[in-house]
Image (cartoon, helix red, strand yellow):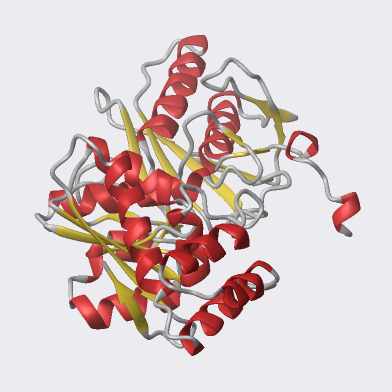
C-alpha cells in the first residue's frame, strides 16, 4: 500500500480484546452447559455499553462441561494475538464456591508481586474477570441457579505468542495474559505495549528495585545492561513511548531512571517530543544545525546539517568535525525528562547509543 493510499487512523477497523473474546466464549459455553444447546453466536455487553456479537469457532458439549472457542479479531491493529483461538471451558463448581478462574494451556500465571493479581493467580486481568463474572451471574440468574462456576481460559498458541511479549520478563509464565479494559482494540493505540510498561514499573517497585531503565530498542537495552549491570526486571522496553513511561513514573516513582536510546530517537526527545514514533515526530535538522553552531560548528557544517537526510549522517558530520552533538542531545533529552518528572525526586540520566551498541554520550 503506497503512502498516498494508507488508511488514516479513523478509517482503521477496530477489533476485540482477548478479554472480550474470553467473555463471549464463556457466555456461549455456559449457555450450552445449562441449556444443552449452543447459541448461534455470542452477544456480550462491554464496559462502555457496546454489544458486539461473536461467531463460535469451537463447540464441545459433554455431561459435565461445555467448551467454546472464539477467534480473536484485532481489526487493523498489528496485535500479536490477532487470529488467536480463545477457548473457555466451563463446569459447575462446588456449592458456595462462586466463580473460579483457571489458566489452561497458553494462558500465563502471575509469579511476581506488583502484577494486577497475587502470584499464583491465572493471568486473567481484573476487567476481563469482572466482565466474565457479570455475564455468568446474569446467565445463572436466568436459569435460577447459584453462580458457582469454574472457568478455564486456554489459548492453544499462547505460550509461543507470549515469547513476543513482555510476559516472561514480568514474571507471567506459561502463556499470554487475558487483557482489556474496554473490550475494544483501537488500531495503533499500542495500548498493550503501554500496559506492559506500566506493569514493568509495578513489578520493579514491588520487588524493591531502586533503578529502572527505559530503552528505545534492543541495541540500546543491551548497551545499558552492559553499562549498568542491573537485574533483568529493571529494563523496560519503552520503544517510542517515553511519555507513557514518564507519566506513569510520576505517579509511581522509582528513585533512579535511565533513558537509553539511539541518537535519532533521543534527538526527538531533546527537541521536546514524548512520542518518538516516526509517524508522530520527526528529526528537525534546522534545530540540530543551530545546536551544533552553539557548540562551535562552522557555517559550512551548519549548512551541511540542514541538508542531511538522516540523524546518523548529522552525527557523522559532527564527529568528523570534533563537535560533540551527542553529548548536547543527551543533556537536552535529560532536561526534557526532568521537566516531565517535575515534582518528583527521581534522579535521571540519559545514554546515547550508536547503531553498533556503543554508548557515545551520557548525561
On the rendered structure, is 73 left or right of 46? right
Quadrant position of the N terminus in the picture:
bottom right
Q: Look at the picture and state if 278 lies above or below 227.
A: above
| Residue placed most toward the observer, 84 or 302 | 302
On the rendered structure, is 170 left or right of 40? left
Q: How many marks?
A: 0
Q: Residue at left 20%, top 50%?
A: 119
On the rendered structure, is 211 left or right of 53? left
Q: Look at the picture and state if 36 lies above or below 325.
A: above
The picture places residue 358, in percent across and down from the top left corner, at: 37, 86
The picture places residue 251, in percent across and down from the top left corner, at: 24, 35
Quadrant position of the C terminus in the picture:
bottom left
Q: Look at the picture and state if 19 lies above or below 290.
A: above
Q: Residue at left 56%, top 22%?
A: 46
Q: Residue at left 70%, top 70%?
A: 307
On the rendered structure, is 202 left or right of 246? left
Residue 126 in sight here: yes
Q: Residue at left 9%, top 54%?
A: 208
The picture places residue 179, in percent across and down from the top left corner, at: 46, 42
The picture places residue 278, in percent across and down from the top left corner, at: 63, 57
Q: Look at the picture and state if 222 lies above or below 114.
A: below
Q: Quadrant of residue 236?
A: bottom left
| Residue placed most toward the observer, 42 or 330 | 330
Residue 159 in sight here: no
Amino acid at each position: 500500500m503506497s503512502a498516498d493510499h494508507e488508511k488514516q487512523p479513523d478509517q482503521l477497523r477496530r477489533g476485540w480484546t482477548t478479554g472480550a473474546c474470553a467473555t463471549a466464549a464463556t457466555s456461549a459455553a455456559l449457555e450450552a452447559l445449562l441449556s444443552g444447546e449452543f447459541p448461534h453466536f455470542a452477544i456480550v455487553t462491554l464496559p462502555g455499553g457496546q454489544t458486539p456479537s461473536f461467531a463460535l469457532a469451537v463447540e464441545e458439549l459433554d455431561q459435565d462441561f461445555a467448551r467454546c472457542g472464539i477467534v480473536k479479531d484485532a481489526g487493523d491493529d498489528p496485535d500479536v494475538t490477532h487470529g488467536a483461538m480463545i477457548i473457555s471451558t466451563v463446569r459447575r463448581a462446588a456449592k458456595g464456591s462462586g466463580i473460579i478462574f483457571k489458566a489452561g494451556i497458553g494462558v500465563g500465571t502471575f509469579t511476581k508481586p506488583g502484577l494486577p493479581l497475587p502470584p499464583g493467580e491465572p493471568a486473567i486481568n481484573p476487567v476481563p474477570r469482572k466482565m466474565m463474572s457479570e455475564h455468568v451471574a446474569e446467565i445463572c440468574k436466568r436459569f435460577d441457579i447459584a453462580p458457582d462456576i469454574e472457568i478455564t481460559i486456554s489459548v492453544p498458541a499462547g505460550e509461543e505468542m507470549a515469547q513476543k511479549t513482555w510476559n516472561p520478563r514480568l514474571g507471567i509464565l506459561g502463556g499470554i495474559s487475558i487483557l482489556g479494559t474496554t473490550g475494544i482494540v483501537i488500531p495503533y493505540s499500542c495500548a498493550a505495549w503501554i500496559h506492559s510498561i506500566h506493569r514493568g514499573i509495578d513489578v520493579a517497585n514491588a520487588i524493591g528495585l531502586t533503578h529502572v531503565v527505559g530503552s528505545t530498542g534492543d541495541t540500546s537495552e543491551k548497551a545499558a545492561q552492559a553499562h549498568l549491570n542491573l537485574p533483568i526486571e529493571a529494563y523496560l522496553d519503552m520503544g517510542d513511548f517515553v511519555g507513557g513511561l514518564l507519566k506513569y513514573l510520576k505517579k509511581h516513582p522509582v528513585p533512579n531512571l535511565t533513558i537509553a536510546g539511539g541518537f535519532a530517537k533521543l534527538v526527538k526527545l531533546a527537541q521536546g517530543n514524548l512520542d518518538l514514533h516516526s509517524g508522530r515526530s520527526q528529526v528537525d535538522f534546522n534545530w540540530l544545525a543551530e545546536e551544533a553552531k552553539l557548540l562551535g560548528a562552522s557555517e559550512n557544517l551548519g549548512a551541511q546539517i540542514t541538508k542531511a537526510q538522516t540523524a546518523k549522517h548529522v552525527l557523522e558530520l559532527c564527529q568528523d568535525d570534533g563537535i560533540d552533538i551527542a553529548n548536547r542531545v543527551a543533556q537536552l533529552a535529560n532536561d526534557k525528562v526532568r521537566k516531565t518528572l517535575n515534582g518528583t525526586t527521581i534522579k535521571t540520566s540519559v545514554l546515547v547509543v550508536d547503531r553498533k551498541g556503543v554508548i557515545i554520550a551520557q548525561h
